[in-house]
Image: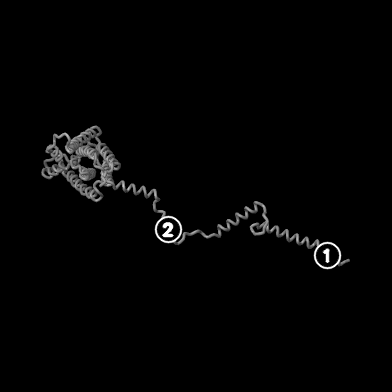
Amino acid sequence: MLSNQHPQRVMPTQEADERGVKAADWDQKTEHPSSPNTPLGSSSSRESTIEQSSEKNVQASPPQRPFASDPPLDESKPSAPSRAFLQRSQIYCSSQVSTNHADILLLWCCVISGLVDSTIYNAFGTFVSMQTGNTIFLGLGGATPDSTSKPYGWAKSFVSIACFCLGCIVFSHMTRLLGNLKRSTLVASFLSQTLIIFVATIVVQCGAVNGSLDSITDDIDWYAIIPIALLSFQSAGQIVGSRALNLSEIPTVVLTSMLHDVFTDRNLLARDNVKRNRRVLAFFAILIGAICGGFIGEETTRMQIPLWIAGALKLIITLAWAFWPEKQTSAV
């Protein structure tokens, strides 16, 4: 009897132990649901486990590196639209401009010559464009130094002639090097002339040179050499431009030879004579510019006012060259 009852007393203990082991296994599986044969736990435990595993994967994965065969990335290269824009700009700047109606811009250059020359002569007694008169002043200064009221006036004329010749050398070489009719050449030439006029005007505006026309009484103010030199240098660019455009009948800075060509033309009285018309208009353009320069100087008594106007006109001409029509080439 005792032997038959002993297993009945042990069974509850074994079953309890087995239930405890199963319960422990269940707790472990719910804490680690990612292992196979694990029953699904709560949604919050699954989300936390996924986040922990993803963080471990991110930390464990090495940084991605390009393959050795891949070319290195060059971030300095422009994008495709930028390259296309640069190519179109380069083609546009290197194109040749049309000479049709280009005489209009040169006639405005004649107005500028008359405006600037009348202003500078009124202030300093010399020219910056018409070098024929400066040659006479240079000769008179050297021949009659004691009898003239301006014994050093020849120095200003000499500086003007020398800077004009230097400007002819610089502008002509630049034009031949870059191309006579290229848009970029004309824009660069007239833009440099514009900047030079503005620099000369600023020198007067700042007071480095006396710009009051009614108070300039000295024979020579050596600081006056600065605007004379700058304005003479830039005026050479105009006549170089007229030669580059093959419009030599509008030299913009010469009157004597232009008048000669007008009255020695065999077709002077012809109805259609383009060159004669251009020469006559150039003469009156210089005359109108000189009249305007004298009138403005008389009313304002300030030399820089006409120079500001001349610089603005030259800037407009520069912008006109930037948008001037392209030369049309006929297909052969």
Q: In this view, does 199 lie to the left or right of 284?
A: right
- Badge 1 marks a residue whose secondary structure is helix
Is residue 262 something one can see in this rendering? Answer: yes
Residue at 10% x, 44% y is 143
The answer to which image quadrant residue 208 occupies is top left
Q: Give the farthest residue toward the front.
A: 332
Residue 279 in percent (x, y) is at 17, 38
Labels 1, 2: front one: 1
Check disc 2 and give the amino acid type: Pro
Location of residue 77 with respect to 285 vertically, above or below:
below
Q: Which of 6 and 224 is in front in this view?
A: 6
Check disc 1 and give the amino acid type: Pro
Is residue 119 something one can see in this rendering? Answer: no
Residue 205 in percent (x, y) is at 28, 40
The answer to which image quadrant residue 114 occupies is top left
> In the rendered image, which quarter contains the N terminus?
bottom right
The answer to which image quadrant residue 302 occupies is top left
Residue at 15% x, 35% y is 270
Measured in 3D between alpha carbons, the distance from the residue under mark 1 to the one under mark 2, in whole angstroms, is: 81 Å
> Does label 1 or label 2 sit earlier along the sequence?
1
Residue 20 in percent (x, y) is at 75, 60
Q: Is residue 105 left or right of residue 34?
A: left
Q: Which mark is residue 7?
A: 1
Q: Residue 72 carries which label?
A: 2
Location of residue 67 with respect to 170 vertically, above or below:
below
Q: Is residue 227 left or right of residue 5?
A: left
Q: Which of 155 and 82 is in front in this view?
A: 82
Q: Could you classify mark 2 by the number of other residues whose Cα lies within 10 Å: few (under 14), some (14-19), or many (20 or more)?
A: few
- Badge 2 marks a residue whose secondary structure is loop
Give the color scheme: rainbow, by chain, secondary structure or one colour: one colour
The tally of labels here is 2
